[in-house]
Every structure is written in C-alpha cells, then in structure tokens.
Image (cartoon, rainbow, N blue to C red):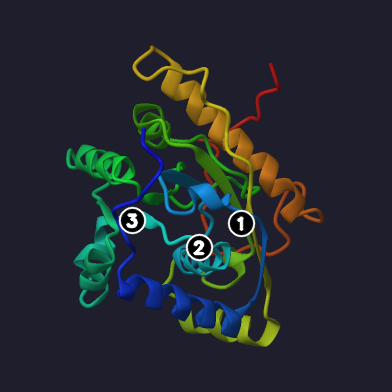
Amino acid sequence: MDTARSPWQPPLIWRAAQLLARVVVALLARLEVTGSVPAQLRRGPLILAANHISPFDPVVMAAACRAAGVAPRIMATGGLFRAPVVGAAMRRAGHIRVERGTNAVHQALDDAAAAVAGGSVILVYPEGRIGLDPGMWPERGKTGTARLALACGAPVIPVAQWGAHEVLPYRAPKGLLRGIARSVLRRPVIRVHFGRPVELTDLAHGVPGAARRATDRIIDALTDELVPLRPDEPDRPRYVDPGRPADTSRSHRRRPPA
C-alpha cells in the first residue's frame, strides 16, 4: 500500500470539534496522554484500536488524538448519525456509520476499508461495545478490526484509556447531570496511552483463523498497555458505576507469548 501521501484531509468541522473536545475534557477531568503516533503514520493509512469503557470515550479520544497530532475518522454507532445536529456533524466530519446488529454492518467495513486505502486514519473499538467485564478489562474482540487490518495491510496501534468511566454513567443520558457535577468537583484523571503497533505481518488475509488470532493479539496489546494506567486497580475498578451491568460471557484471557 502506498503510504507516501494521504488524499483525505480532516475537514475544518472535525478539527474544530477536536479542539472543543480538549476544552470539554479539561473542564471535567485531568487528561494525561502518553506514548505517541509515529510522524510517518499520523496522516495514515493507520488503524487506532481503543478499549471502550464509557459513553464519554469519543470525547476523550477526540481530545487525546488532537494531543497526539492525529485526526482519525471514527467508526461510530448508527444512532449518532440519526441524531439531530450531531448526525449531520458526524457525516460532514467524515466519520463512518456502523449499523450494529444489521446486515448493513458489512457496509461499514467496506467504507472503512476504502477510507484506509485512501490514506485515512481510522479509530475503532474492537470490542464492538462498551465493555461489561466486571474488572473493566478489554473483552474478547469482534474480528472486524482485524479483518480490516489484514485486508488493507495498515498498521494497528493500540490506544489504552482509563478514567472516562468516572465522568459519564453507563446509562447516560440517565444520570448525566449528576455525573457531570461529580466530575467538575472531583476532576478525575483520564489517562490515554498510544502503544506500539501490533505485530500482524505473519498473518495472511483470508487464511482460516487468521482474523481471530489477529483480534486476540490486538486485545492482548490493549490489555498490556492498560495495565500501567491503572496500577492501583489490578482486579476491579476503584470507582464502580451502580448502573453498569456485568457480563462475563465475553471475558478475554490474555494468551501467553508464543
């Protein structure tokens, strides 16, 4: 794949939204961004794979990506695109619609593949939902992110984050104002770390089992990068959202190195 140039440029509305996200996060929390995106990858093609812990994640990731010098196109649930004002802004910003639970979800992968092939940076949540693991560790991932990476040959950088769950409740907008008030008073620390690219070059697109193995590597990498962000919370989070359900059916167990 030609990585020398990127014909897609982030529109002004998205760059302005990233700046606004920095302001919003600064009002509600303390943002710490570590790691980096190599300069040669910041304009793509590149896939950023982040763990999903809160409805506040998109705002956090927009702010953190601005700090890292990237303006990714986000693969986001179709409900956001149907919302008044927000939906129009999402479309104008070039983000990619994902209609989960429908046959149209395959269209999202096609759109993402075309975007990556065109030189874009794509931000995805490989878990496919806000994780419900009781310890808030990354869940077993869906294979879409891996299939996208293997098909396009684009590098995958894991982006681990921690702390956004203390800002907005899982069931937002229920409890939204209470969560915001709590955050303004306590100003939780939100940590985001851009890790090293995941090694996938030994896996071939279309080979049986390759997408599953690649997915497990991506989730393993996210787990490894998350560990240093929550050193005092190795098993369970210190802050527990009472409205957040627990589901162990998709728990991921870190595989030992081969």
Up the image or down, 96 lies above or below 142; here it is: below
Q: Which residue is mark 3?
A: 76
The quadrant of the rendering that contains the N terminus is top left
User: x%, y% of residue 197?
Assistant: 58, 38
Residue type at tag 3:
Ala
Up the image or down, 185 lies above or below 36; here it is: below
User: x%, y% of residue 29?
Assistant: 63, 77
User: x%, y% of residue 239?
Assistant: 68, 65
**Mark 1 Cα shell of 10 Å, populated few (<14), some (14-19), many (≥20):** many
Q: Nearer the viewer, residue 161 or 111?
A: 111
User: Which label number is shown at residue 56?
Assistant: none
Q: Are marks 1 and 3 in contact (CB under 8 Å)?
A: no
The quadrant of the rendering that contains the C terminus is top right
Q: Which residue is mark 1?
A: 161
Q: Quadrant of residue 165?
A: bottom right
Q: Residue furthest top?
A: 208
User: x%, y% of residue 148?
Assistant: 36, 34
Q: Which residue is mark 2?
A: 61
Query: Who comes first in sequence, dot 3 or dot 2?
Result: 2
Q: Quadrant of residue 33?
A: bottom right
Regarding mark 3 in the picture, which secondary structure is present there? Answer: strand
Residue type at tag 1:
Gln
